[in-house]
Image: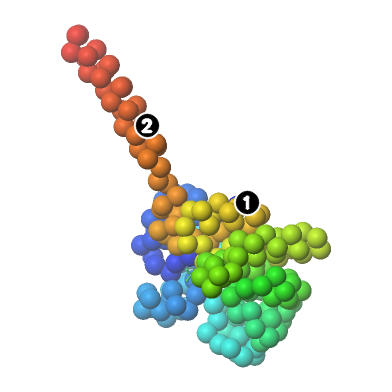
Amino acid sequence: MKFFLDTANLEELKAGARWGIIDGVTTNPSLIAKEGVPLEDQIRRICDIIDGDVSAEVIATEADEMVAQGRELAKIHKNVVVKVPLTRDGITACSRLSRDGIRVNVTLCFSAGQALLAAKAGAYFVSPFAGRLDDIGGDGIGLIRDIVQIYKNYGFNTQVLAASLRHTAHVIEAAKAGAHIGTLPYKVIDGMFNHPLTDKGLDQFMKDYAKVFEVSSAAR
Ligand code: G3P
């Protein structure tokens, strides 16, 4: 399973990069706006920090505009994956960009039927939003499981990028469901490190070792 960071914040990206386990980045217009830097500039900076796929979303709702913007975004860096919404125009844009060899992430996917449309359009990634579906009483992880199964049935190459993952249990369940990628906010991946028994065990190891070697050096 690949881990992407779901953030446009450079400090979070630098901190995550140090762990050596981040395979890419996803952004969206809300995350870019939070950083207050125009899309193209921020994507360029992100590509300088993370050596992996970086999703950059078009700011358009009409197919021709999405295609034009997508082509420009793809020129920023070889790692850019153009992100389009799962609408009729988005799927049209995905088909056209994919035919040109530009990798596309189809986002805002909330049903297996929508995910089939994305695969048919040649999407490189499809992004089902687990948390937002759970928010309205749906089954976000069930959706991921269904998409993975359907893609397997037909040999679609589109990778399932589990998005809107809000906590560790979401990540584990998405992994069990077979998601190829999980995109995680910094605080979610940071939280995955924590276990009280790890802290307790490490504390004990340090104390035990220090006790013996303190005694030994005092005896010499
Ligand atoms: O990148 C989009 C997605 O991960 C959004 O997550 O928590 O805003 O639903 P959330």
Mark 1 Cα-neighbour bin, 10 Å: few <14, some 14–19, many ≥20: few
Instruction: Report the residue marked by disc 2.
Output: 201
Q: Quadrant of residue 12?
A: bottom left
Q: Amino acid at mark 2?
A: Gly
Look at the numbered disc 1 and give the secondary structure of its residue. helix
Q: Position of residue 185 (x, y in %)?
A: 45, 62
Q: Is residue 159 above or below residue 86?
A: above
Q: Is residue 189 above or below residue 82?
A: above
Q: Position of residue 102 (x, y in %)?
A: 66, 74
Marks 2/1: CA distance?
28 Å
Q: Position of residue 126 (x, y in %)?
A: 64, 69
Mark 2 Cα-neighbour bin, 10 Å: few <14, some 14–19, many ≥20: few
Instruction: Report the residue marked by disc 1.
Output: 176
Q: Quadrant of residue 42?
A: bottom left
Q: Amino acid at mark 1?
A: Lys
Q: State how the image is colored.
A: rainbow
Q: Position of residue 25 (x, y in %)?
A: 51, 64
Q: Is residue 204 above or below residue 158?
A: above
The residue depicted at 62 percent of the width and 91 percent of the height is: 62
Q: Quadrant of residue 109?
A: bottom right
